[in-house]
Image: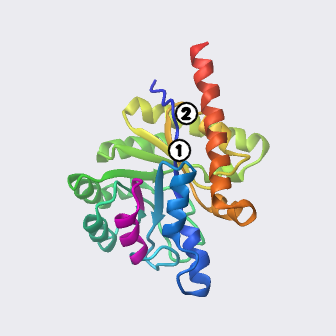
Amino acid sequence: MTLVNRLRLGVNIDHVATIRNARGGRHPDPVRAARLAAEAGADGITAHLREDRRHISDEDIERLSREIDLPLNLEMAATEEMLLIALRHKPHAVCMVPEKREELTTEGGLDVAAQHRHLASYVERLGGAGIRVSLFIDPSPVQLHVAKALGAPVVELHTGAYCEANGAAREAELQRLIEAAAYADDLGLEVHAGHGLAFDSVGPVAAIPQIAELNIGHFLVGEAIFGGLDSSIKRMRALMDQARAGVSGAESA
């Protein structure tokens, strides 16, 4: 079993851009948010360039690529337009996600089992350009097996069902994540996770020893309204570190 001692935090700045776009203009600036995230302890910046450009814009991606020192994780749909943008900017990583124009947010994982023929060339071309490829999938053994067969080095487990559930249902969803992370590790995949994580839900996911990175955005931006972006990121970072320290202590006991 791979035990990742320090869990990385990728901060998604999409919804800083959502607030900006609600009124137009340049404020609040997502690139400024990325700088603040770096100062507050983020290990990377995540941004989803959607087909309809509802939040992050092409200019944002250009500026993030040019002005931010942290690794950039570009979330994108598997389309030729997005592929060409990724190949032009060459971010540290690309996470391919499902995308529907009518959805408010990503509703589930990418069905790589059903779309493997379509996805294969994207994984190959991005990887060939030196970009780390991640596939955003539900915690399913079938999806993990196909992700491995496609040659993607990283998977990001969709945590939305876990975050939205309560009681026994949440425990069941957590168990799915635990089992999926272990299976992905057995397959030799690097494991990330994200979607919907908050202060009250991050701990059990952060404690899964095979997970190397969490990507969190909407909740952090929402909390920033009340206490500041640096404060929300620092608290999330502390909760992640606390949960991971408990795992490390248990392993060494």
In magenta stretch: residue 55: no
Image spot of residue 79 (x, y percent): 34, 70
Q: Which residue is mark 1?
A: 139
- Residue at 66 percent of width and 37 percent of height: 204
For the residue pair 163 and 40, the one nearer the viewer reads as 40
Residue found at the far bottom of this picture: 24
Using a 10 Å C-alpha cutoff, classify the residue at mark 2 as few (fewer than 14 neighbours), some (14 to 19) or many (20 or more). some
For the residue pair 46 and 165, the one nearer the viewer reads as 46
Q: CA distance from mark 1 to mark 2?
A: 8 Å
Tag 2: amino acid = Glu
Q: Splitting the image into 4 quarters, where does residue 208 fall?
A: top right
Note whether 119 is above or below 141 in the view shown.
below
Note whether 166 is above or below 228 in the view shown.
above
In magenta stretch: residue 61: yes
- 204 sits to left or right of 252: right
Inspect this view and state whether residue 7 appears.
Answer: yes
Q: Which residue is mark 2?
A: 179
Q: Give the residues in magenta.
A: 59-74
Q: Splitting the image into 4 quarters, where does residue 217 fall?
A: bottom right
Tag 1: amino acid = Pro
Q: In the rendered structure, find residue 199 and report the number of the disc placed on it.
A: none
- Quadrant where the C terminus sits is top right
For the residue pair 203 and 237, the one nearer the viewer reads as 237
Image spot of residue 57 (x, y percent): 44, 76
User: SS for tag 2?
Assistant: helix
Labels 1 & 2 near each other (Cβ < 8 A):
yes
- Residue at 41 percent of width and 29 percent of height: 186
- 61 sits to left or right of 166: left
